[in-house]
Amino acid sequence: MIVDKIKKQEVKNVKNKKPNIDIPVGKWIKCDNCKEILYKEAVRDNLSICPNCGHYFRMHIGKRLNLIIDDGTYKRFDINIDTPNPLQLEDYPRKLKSLREKTGLEEAVSCGIGNINGEKVVICIMDSAFLMGSMGIVVGEKITYSIEQAVQKRLPLIIFSTSGGARMQEGIISLMQMAKTTAALTKLHEAGLLYISVLTDPTYGGVTASFASLGDIILAEPKAMIGFAGQRVIEQTIGESLPEGFQTAEFLLEHGFIDKIVERKDLKETIYKLIKFHKGGLTYSE
């Protein structure tokens, strides 16, 4: 009887003993698609793509610039605009401060001039890590300024979009950015300059309904989710089920909304060739 109690106690102690495994915090990431636990460095080295299933992780502005722009050629536009608080929300300034410390970004977009294989371009890159890439007053103004610079300097314009839509913390003024960016793009079009829009996951709302959909050429990354309202909202509104794959880049390509799906590794070369085509420096066979 006493021996049995001792044996049970020994088994219990073994089960409760924690294994001495040293797993560094922040070194691992879980893939949302295949659920595999991945080493962060392996994902970074693979262009932020899951090496197990090919799922595209969202990309930080800095990494995107390194992927697209020639080393040492990017010069960010010096636009000193502080993000306003038109609705006087108490938490909004604190949220912005926290995000700036966490992401190292001032706002949801970075704009400037750089070279793509030696070809000078104006480029804007959005980042979903900053308030889901929402378009507020500063985002709209920076993109409009960039379009104006492209017109003034007669350069191609490249915009990488990722967004949840207009920024609700700035009310109706955020919606006005749709009209402002669209009007600026009209001037770019009238000047005969090239605008390439690249849609990444996700691109929704007012961004999709304005500058993201107005490119002379619209590219997208594989399986990027693109639309205006979310699928659930649309289904509840129309009272019907939507087709399989609705709002994916592949579905939109099939229905003529975008021109080409381009893998991340091929984006720089594809954009370069499109710029050269527009300038007349390449033939179709190349």
Image: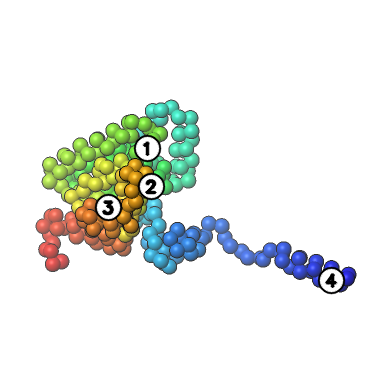
Asked whether residue 278 appears in the rendered view, the answer is yes
Residue type, numbered disc 3: Val
Q: Is residue 161 above or below residue 97?
A: below
Residue at point 84%, 71% (across, down): 4
Residue at point 42%, 47% (across, down): 129
Q: Earlier in the sequence, mark 2 or mark 4?
A: 4
Give the labeled residue for mark 3.
198
Residue 172 screen position, x and y as percent:
33, 31
Q: Nearer the viewer, residue 186 or 158?
A: 186
Q: Is residue 27 left or right of residue 273?
A: right
SS of the residue under disc 1: loop
Q: CA distance from mark 3 to mark 2?
A: 25 Å
Q: Residue furthest front?
A: 239
Q: Earlier in the sequence, mark 4 or mark 3?
A: 4
Residue type, numbered disc 1: Arg
Residue 180 screen position, x and y as percent:
24, 35
Q: Earlier in the sequence, mark 2 or mark 1?
A: 1
Residue type, numbered disc 2: Arg
Residue 142 screen position, x and y as percent:
30, 39
Give the labeled residue for mark 1.
167
SS of the residue under disc 4: helix
Q: CA distance from mark 3 to mark 1?
A: 21 Å
Residue type, numbered disc 4: Asp
Give the labeled residue for mark 2.
232
